[in-house]
Amino acid sequence: MTSTSLAMVVLAACLHASWNLMSKHTAAAGVVFVFASSTLALVAFAPWALWIVVQHPIVWTWQVAGCIFLSALINLTYSLCLQRGYQVADLSVVYPIARGTGPLLSSICAYMAFSESPTLTGVSGLIGVITGIGLITTQGNLHAFRRPAGKLGLFWGGATGALIAAYTIIDASAIKMLDLQPVFFFWSSTLLRVAMMAPVVLRDPAQSLRRMQGNWWLAMGVGLLSTLSYALILTVLQMGAPVSIVAPAREMSMMVGTLLGMVILKEHVGPWRLTGCIVLVGGVICLGAARP
């Protein structure tokens, strides 16, 4: 990965951690908040998406339409699957399994789908990232994995990770093989997700508005930052960076989120989390040095 690509991935990780920090304060709003933030992002980025279409006219084919539809469907299913996992299982199991299996499966699929060749440095970086995620999220306490809910956590975390890998490969295919422009592709996918959520959210508009009271500015921030974050990742893929390197490297947001939590939310960061951050950074450095 080039230094420019790595810098863009690091910036995307910072943006990703920032919007997740904002979302932490709006958990009660649920799908209504996701709908609102996505809708606000659609409006904000509409001029950019329109300009891209004018500059780079889209040649609509079944493959193009299929990629956009599948991306929207799988991204929405991923959100619901993760939410369900948090409802029935331990977060300390679901989250590390999801964030660990996601880049692992993405890399394995990329080796097959895009004929990317694994390198010792790249595989070492992948292992470092997954290990770092585990240390940060579990803080060295594996007791949750031994509880009955731990098995449910393994299932829902693994399912979520598989969905992360699925949308990563589909989105990469749209950018790398169909030559779709990243911002337009993600904007179109978001438009479909909003349409899918609309019947649920608009079934009781008054209740939805009540849930959003005091959350509109956060919704705007999440909508803008999440879109920019993922657009950067798709742009890096468009520039030729391998999916097997980009997918795990973007998990650097875990470390950024931990540091933001420590500085802004005054959360305790013990030796396990600090060690996890160091291991994760080491993994990302290896990924940055890897060459396909």
Image (cartoon, rainbow, N blue to C red):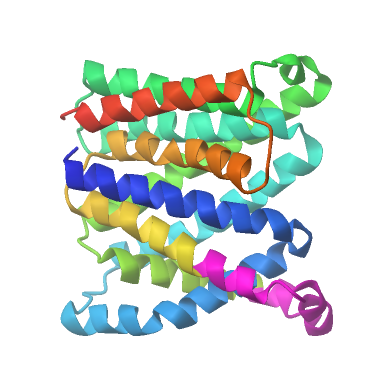
Residue 184 in view, yes or no: yes
Q: Is residue 49 placed above or below 117 in the rendered structure?
A: below
Q: Is residue 232 placed above or below 149 in the rendered structure?
A: below
Residue 158 in view, yes or no: no
Measuring 74% from the left and 29% from the top, which residue is drawn there? 152
Locate residue 118: give its quadrant: top left
- Magenta stretch: residue 203 in it? yes
The one nearer the camera, 111 or 258, is 258
Q: Position of residue 245 (x, y in %)?
A: 29, 34
Measuring 29% from the left and 50% from the top, which residue is drawn there? 8
The one nearer the camera, 143 or 64, is 143
Locate residue 208: give its quadrant: bottom right
Q: Is residue 52 placed above or below 189 in the rendered structure?
A: below
Q: Position of residue 50 (x, y in %)?
A: 31, 84
* Quadrant of the snapshot with the C terminus: top left
Measuring 44% from the left and 58% from the top, which residue is drawn there? 71
Report whether 272 appears left or right of 127: right
Report whether 32 appears left or right of 147: left
Q: Is residue 151 placed above or below 168 in the rendered structure?
A: above
Magenta stretch bounds: 198-223
Q: Position of residue 15 (x, y in %)?
A: 45, 55
The one nearer the camera, 185 or 61, is 185
Locate residue 88: give its quadrant: top right
| Secondary structure mostly seen in the magenta stretch | helix
Measuring 33% from the left and 68% from the top, which residue is drawn there? 183
